[in-house]
């Protein structure tokens, strides 16, 4: 029976890249039924009274699965991030962002193969900020044993099941001795005695090493804010935000979304690269493929991956990675190769 997947088009380029991805998945014969739900400023425009309607959260809870476009967050004021609220509301505690070189996309490095595992629920993203007195504000960084342990366990499990050789924790425990110190303590405890190589890097030095030679790393385990920043840094190693997929996992739900945001600078111009979200959809199909009876999903994922690999190898590229194709023409080029 076809699996229902919630589709959240989101804001900015979200509806364009979601539309492109749905076209490819339908052409590839993915056994999915889409159930569209709003989130973001587009939800308000559609008449909802909030940027994250309860019905959207309820739908993801009910089906356990969503493909999500980016949602805009106002800077320095306005409503709180829809993305953060969704991750917290569904307890999607682990973000997984694979970063791989793609043949046909020219960059400084070849053979980059990294995975960022990001803690998604706390740290500075807890949003606890205060104006202590005029001209003085504080922002609270939260770390709990429960969240630090479970993200370390998730990274260990991910490394073991995917045959990854090493996990490196990026931290700043020399300065944030308690919060990052707890993150490190939990990771050390979880990785002790396991067959996965474990190491730690102070994040500033780690970033320098990443841009000099990404091959020294394999899986990067980060608390929330570091994971956010390091994800974009890693995206830059392989061609940018147009080619970097992602997934958010909880105990009972999984939401697949690209690393990029709503890109207001190119929205509505047929200029967005849909590949990052398409790669996220391939992760979604592979996720379904891991369960019993999932073989058709896995086969569909492989068909789509082969098609976009062939498209890139043929030099059919969007503008963000040096080509000239618009969103629509690039999507057609992938569909032709399915
Ligand atoms: P952004 O990721 O939207 O854009 C950064 C740059 O990358 C822009 O120049 C944009 O044109 C380019 N870019 C991004 N995705 C692209 C694609 N698929 N194809 C071609 N070019 C692409 O980040 P920015 O501008 O900092 O944020 C815009 C909004 O998105 C903000 O409101 C932010 O809060 C939100 N955001 C939402 C996320 C989510 O929904 N998960 C993640 C990151 C940001």
Image (cartoon, rainbow, N blue to C red):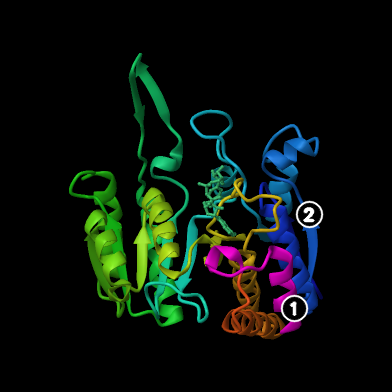
Whether the residue under disc 2 has CB within 8 Å of ligand 1: no
Label 2 neighbourhood size at 10 Å, few (<14), some (14-19), many (20+)?
A: some
Residue projecting furthest to the top? 134
Q: Residue 164 vs residue 259: left or right?
A: left
**In x, y percent, where is residue 29?**
79, 79
Which portion, as a residue range, is magenta? Answer: 318-338
Quadrant of the rendered image containing residue 163 = bottom left
Q: Magenta stretch: residue 58 in it?
A: no
Q: In the rendered image of this protein, does residue 199 appear above or below residue 195?
A: above
Image quarter for residue 215? bottom left
What residue sits right under mark 2 in the picture?
36
Residue at horizontal 23 percent and vertical 61 percent from the top: 201
Q: What is the magenta segment's predominant secondary structure?
A: helix
Q: Residues within 10 Å of mark 1 (few under 14, many from 20)?
A: some
- Counting from the top left corner in percent of width and height, residue 333 is at 71, 77
Q: Secondary structure at mark 2?
A: strand
**Rendered location of residue 301, percent (x, y):** 65, 80
Please state if 118 lies on the left or on the right of 214 as rendered: right
Q: CA distance from mark 1 to mark 2?
A: 23 Å
Residue 9 in percent (x, y) is at: 71, 53
Between circles 1 and 2, the one closer to the viewer is: 1
User: Which residue occupies the foreground of this view, 282 or 286?
Assistant: 282
SS of the residue under disc 1: helix
- The quadrant of the picture occupied by the N terminus is bottom right
Tag shown at residue 139: none
Q: Mark 1 and 2 residues: CB-CB less than 8 Å, in contact?
A: no
The residue that label 1 is drawn on is 335
CB at disc 1 and ligand 1 closer than 8 Å: no
Q: Is residue 336 magenta?
A: yes
């Amino acid at each position: 029976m076809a699996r229902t997947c919630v589709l959240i088009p989101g804001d900015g380029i979200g509806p364009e890249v979601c539309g492109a991805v749905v076209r490819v998945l339908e052409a590839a014969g993915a056994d999915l039924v889409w159930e569209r739900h709003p989130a973001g400023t587009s939800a308000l425009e559609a008449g909802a009274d909030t940027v994250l309607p309860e019905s959207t959260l309820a739908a993801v809870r009910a089906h356990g699965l969503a493909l999500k476009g980016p949602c805009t967050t106002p800077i320095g004021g306005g409503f709180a991030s829809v993305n953060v609220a969704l991750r917290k509301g569904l307890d999607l505690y682990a973000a997984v962002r694979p970063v791989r070189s793609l043949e046909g996309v020219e960059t400084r490095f070849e053979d980059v193969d990294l995975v960022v595992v990001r803690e998604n629920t706390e740290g500075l993203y807890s949003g606890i900020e205060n104006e202590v007195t005029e001209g003085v504000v504080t922002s609270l960084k939260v770390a709990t044993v429960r969240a630090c342990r479970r993200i370390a366990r998730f990274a260990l499990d991910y490394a073991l099941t995917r045959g990854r050789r090493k996990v490196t924790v990026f931290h700043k425990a020399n300065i944030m001795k308690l919060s990052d110190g707890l993150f490190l303590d939990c990771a050390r405890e979880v990785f002790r005695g396991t067959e996965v190589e474990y190491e730690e890097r102070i994040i500033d030095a780690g970033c320098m090493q990443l841009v000099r030679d990404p091959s020294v790393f394999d899986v990067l385990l980060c608390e929330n804010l570091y994971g956010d920043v390091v994800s974009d840094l890693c995206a830059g190693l392989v061609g940018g935000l147009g080619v970097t997929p992602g997934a958010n996992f909880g105990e009972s739900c999984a939401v697949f979304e690209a690393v990029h945001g709503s890109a207001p600078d190119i929205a509505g111009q047929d200029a967005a690269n849909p590949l990052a979200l398409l790669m996220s959809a391939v992760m979604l199909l592979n996720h379904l493929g891991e369960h019993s009876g999932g073989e058709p999903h896995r086969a569909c994922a492989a068909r789509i991956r082969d098609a976009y690999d062939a498209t890139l190898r043929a030099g059919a590229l969007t503008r963000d990675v040096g080509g000239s194709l618009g969103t629509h023409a690039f999507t057609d080029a992938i569909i032709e190769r399915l």
